Image: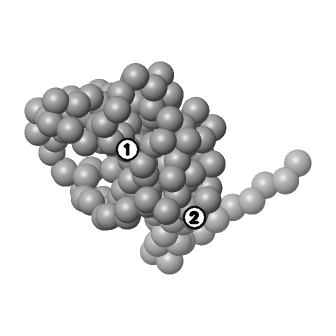
Amino acid sequence: MFVYTVKWNKKTALLIILIAALVICALILLIGALKGSGSGARVSNTQERVEYLESLGWEIQPESEIERSVVIPREFSEIYSAYNQLQLAQGYDLSKYCGLNVNVYTYSILNYKGYTGHVVAEVYVYNSEIVGGDVHSLELDGFMHGLKAK
């Protein structure tokens, strides 16, 4: 049998508190990383984003890419809440990214059936991971739906 005794003093107490704080910080960082991860594909360039959209059934014009940076609002308006419902229905959740900058990539779709107007796909990317997106027409009386081809 092995018995180990520790003399309890200020130095030992401080060391134990410091180790406990480090463990708690590591757990918080790990949980934050897991929470921040989206359910989307990893994409780091135009080709990978186009391949992702093509895997969903879209024919994309890569040269049409438009990139912009947006901040997901800290508090959702009614419109943004409705948009997030669309995201939730396809396995994404923009509320995980409140207050963060995400890149939005827009591409022209060439094979949208039954509609003659201009249709685009938008992909929301955070840290090279797709975290949301939609397909919509650019006309005023248009439409919007999830990323999968209909």
* Residue 87 can be seen in this image: no
Spot occupied by residue 47 in the image (x, y as percentages of width and height) = 61, 59
Circle 1: residue type: Val
Residue name at image x 25 percent, y 42 percent: 138
Q: Is residue 70 above or below residue 140?
A: below
Task: Determine which of the numbered discs, if any, sits on residue 120 in the image.
Answer: 1
Q: Secondary structure at mark 1?
A: strand
Q: Is residue 7 above or below residue 61?
A: below
Report, in whole angstroms, how far the alpha carbon at label 2 lies from the one at label 1: 18 Å
Within 10 Å of disc 1 (Cα), the crowding (few <14, some 14-19, many 20+) is many
Q: Is residue 147 left or right of residue 104?
A: right
Residue name at image x 34 percent, y 32 percent: 116
Residue name at image x 50 percent, y 77 percent: 11
Spot occupied by residue 53 in the image (x, y as percentages of width and height) = 55, 43
Q: Is residue 110 left or right of residue 41?
A: left
Residue receiving disc 2: 45
* Residue 2 can be seen in this image: yes
State the residue lying farthest toward the right: 1
Spot occupied by residue 150 in the image (x, y as percentages of width and height) = 47, 22
Which of 7/13 is in front? 13
Q: Is residue 57 left or right of residue 97?
A: right
